Image (spheres, rainbow, N blue to C red):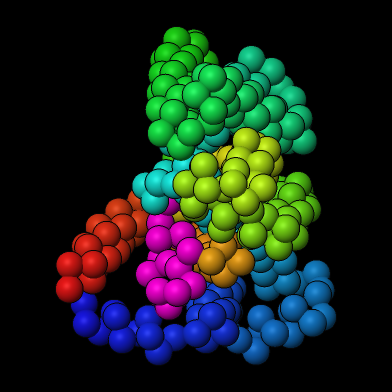
Amino acid sequence: MIYLERLRVATTPTGLFLFGVCMLLLSLLLSLTIGDYQLTLQEVWSVLIDPSKSQASFVVWELRLPRLTLAIIAGITLGIAGAIIQAVTQNELASPSLVGVSSGAALAIVLVLTFTGLSTYFQFIAGIFGGALAMSVTLWLSWKQKLEPVNLILSGLCVSLFCAAATTLLLISVSTDTRGLFYWLLGSVANRTWQHVSLLAPIALLGVILCALLARPLTILQLDSDVVKSIGGNVKRWRIQTLTVAVVLTSATVAVTGPIAFVGLVAPHLCRTLLPKHLAYEYRYVLFGSALSGAVLVSLSDLLANYQEIPVGILCVLFGGPSLVWLIQSRYQQASI
């Protein structure tokens, strides 16, 4: 763990940003070249700068590039949402799934897919509505307790468990074949097109822009509520505003990719562990660092998932679980030194 502490001292936000970008570029190269249809770097480059009607062009532009792009965007949105929710709840084990957003969005989409034949666009709208409704119930349950972090978490956990149970009951009750829905509930970017990218990309861009405006309030919210009020801060308003951004980002992502677990939990932890200690809770760095960490995690996980066509959500859990345990142990040992 001494090496990890030295790494934190030696690294800078700029260095970490460049390292994350390099990892994304590596993921890009591998994703576009490796697969059932092998391509060389020269072939990929020629297809990217001059698309044609060749098979190589179809593989790159219609199969691999939309999938990789969506994986990166999903990682960005989930990383930002996870960082926001951990800041608002003042709990580093919080995530979008813990406050009911992911489960609410998933329940709404399963209802739409099971009982209607609506298009992808309406499924997208239903997912955002479901996540927003679940978060509204969470806020309503904790409103009388002044939206204190503990009450937010407990209320969100109840909503999340209810939505998850309702989803499971729905899937085992309907007479239609639900194997595709069970696969979707594991989270995947396979078989996604540019239409899915066009739905999620504007919301992700808006989320990144709002990060610049939310950074200062989120940093101040790490203080005690009474202290925030004493310096003129509006705790309830800031919490509702930031949670709204997290809800929209998470719900939109779930609507397109399904619930990809652990990214919103692990990405902020990874960012804080690598940042120098004096910047680990400065949210102008944490938000963007979490976005980059989430993008790297999902894109690299999907690169491996592509070999056996397994949902990327499974690999995110397989990688994220041990990573989270390692991060927690390393930070505990650092605190005890």
Type of secondary structure dominating the magenta stretch: helix
Camera sees residue 227: yes
**Residue name at image x 56 percent, y 63 percent:** 283
Give the image location of residue 25, x and y in percent: 58, 79
In the picture, residue 40 is in which quadrant? bottom right
**224 to 171, vertically: above or below:** below
Vertical placement of residue 235 versus 21, above or below:
above
Quadrant in the picture for the C terminus: bottom left
Q: Which residues are magenta?
A: 264-281
Q: Is residue 295 left or right of residue 92?
A: right
Q: Nearer the viewer, residue 234 or 216?
A: 234
Q: Quadrant of residue 17?
A: bottom right
Does 267 sit above or below residue 141?
A: below
Residue closest to the eye, 302 or 319: 319
In percent of width and height, residue 303 lies at: 47, 65
Q: Nearer the viewer, residue 53 or 285?
A: 285
Q: Position of residue 23 (x, y in %)?
A: 51, 78
Tell me: 117 left or right of 39.
right
> Which residue is depicted at the point 31% across and 86% down?
6
